[in-house]
Amino acid sequence: MTIIRNIDDPVLSIASGIILDRVGEEFAIIFCANLIAIGRINILLAIPPKKELE
């Protein structure tokens, strides 16, 4: 598993650099902001509702 991780990290770094060169910085910022927003929504949906005290 660590061998795959050691190979995967440089490949993803190169791929992200190529994508950043092709589409520009603004797209990358918007894309990352959307991923963060989706992650926050998933966290909020995963929290169970509190039970009211009787």
Image: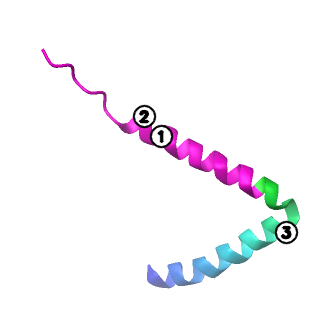
Q: Which residue is mark 3?
A: 21
- Tag 3: amino acid: Asp
Is residue 44 shown in magenta?
yes
User: Going from the N terminus, do you reach mark 3 or mark 1 first?
Assistant: 3
Instruction: Name the one closer to the observer, 12 or 47.
Output: 47
List x then y, in percent, for residue 9.
59, 78
Q: Which residue is mark 2?
A: 45
- Tag 2: amino acid: Leu
Instruction: Name the one closer to the observer, 28 or 3.
Output: 28
Instruction: Name the one closer to the observer, 46 or 7.
Output: 46
User: Going from the N terminus, do you reach mark 3 or mark 2 first?
Assistant: 3
Q: Which residue is mark 1?
A: 42
Contact? badges 1 and 2 (CB < 8 Å): yes
List x then y, in percent, for residue 53.
15, 19
Up-down: is 27 above or below 40?
Answer: below
**Spatial distance from mark 1 to mark 2, Cα to Cα?**
5 Å
**Spatial distance from mark 3 to mark 2, Cα to Cα?**
35 Å
Q: Which residues are magenta?
A: 28-54
Quick check: 12 left or right of 4?
Answer: right
What secondary structure is marked by label 2?
helix
What secondary structure is marked by label 1?
helix
Q: Quadrant of the N terminus?
A: bottom left
Q: Quadrant of the C terminus?
A: top left
Which residue appears farthest toward the front when viewing the image?
A: 53
Residue at image coords 30%, 27% = 49
Q: How is the image coloured?
A: rainbow
**Spatial distance from mark 3 to mark 1, Cα to Cα?**
30 Å
Is residue 2 shown in magenta?
no
List x then y, in percent, for residue 38.
57, 42
- Tag 1: amino acid: Asn
